[in-house]
Amino acid sequence: GAGVSQSPRYKVAKRGQDVALRCDPISGHVSLFWYQQALGQGPEFLTYFQNEAQLDKSGLPSDRFFAERPEGSVSTLKIQRTQQEDSAVYLCASSFRGAGNTIYFGEGSWLTVV
Amino acid sequence: QKEVEQNSGPLSVPEGAIASLNCTYSDRGSQSFFWYRQYSGKSPELIMSIYSNGDKEDGRFTAQLNKASQYVSLLIRDSQPSDSATYLCAPEGEKAAGNKLTFGGGTRVLVKP
């Protein structure tokens, strides 16, 4: 595809429910990032993949958050037992390689936990 | 202290004026710096990148970098109502850390006709 594609665009989850957010990066992009953006805040780093390898997961807020990219392309961010504080926009971004290359963002998945 | 500091604003400027946005960062290892624009409800889009000390101009935008002072700024000349958005400063991390971007909280800019 032409850009980074994320789905679902909008998700309302009941507290305690598990959710899965999908990211389809730009074809050929090696690096993939997940960010969390709360209302009125800047994006906060969650995790980084280079191909299928998860090289940095230091930003994942708890063990309820899990991300994978098994074939080095599509990535899934999974949140187990969602809590209200998980309500945010989850942004996926990709770049050809990390170093100085432009990072392109998807439109985001808006998660509301009720 | 946050890693990347920006004035949250809103920064209100009249149409045609210069908007000046500032950003300070704590990681002395950062070598690349990016400015993203984010419209309400949309994802960030890259508008400027700067790698060397000094000024870099691109159209109505000028980025300024001073690594010794750990300071980067963005000037928007001849501001237009379409420039009303949140501007995010993002230094790039070390290569070993995947060159991830660390974002500031953003400065909201309002350009009034």
Image: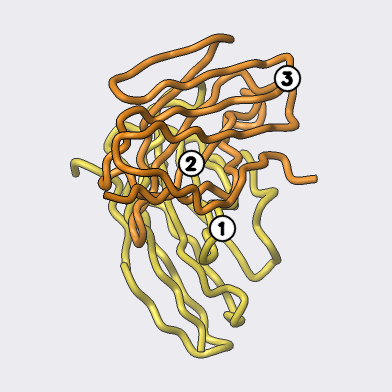
Residue nearer the viewer, A23 or A102: A102
Residue at mark 3: chain: B
Classify mark 1: residues with Cα within 10 Å, few (<14), some (14-19) or many (20+): some
Residue nearer the viewer, B75 or B54: B75
**x and y, in percent, of residue B48 in the image:** 40, 26
In the image: residue B97, left or right of residue B45 = right
| Label whose residue precedes the other's in the sequence (2 or 1) | 1
Q: Residue at x 55, y 40 (%)?
A: A53
* Way the structure is coloured: by chain
Amino acid at the residue labelled 2: Glu
Quarter residue B23 falls in: top right
Which numbered marker is on residue B69? 3
**x and y, in percent, of residue B53 in the image:** 58, 10
Q: Which chain is orange?
A: B
In the image: residue A109, left or right of residue A2 = right
Q: Residue at x 47, y 21 (%)?
A: B63
Q: Which chain is yellow?
A: A
**x and y, in percent, of residue B82 in the image:** 26, 46
Amino acid at the residue labelled 3: Ser
Q: Are marks 3 and 1 on the same chain?
A: no
Which numbered marker is on residue A52? 2
Q: CA distance from mark 3 to mark 1?
A: 25 Å
Residue at which label 1 appears: A41
Q: CA distance from mark 3 to mark 2?
A: 38 Å
Quarter residue A85 falls in: bottom right
Q: SS class of the residue under badge 1?
A: loop
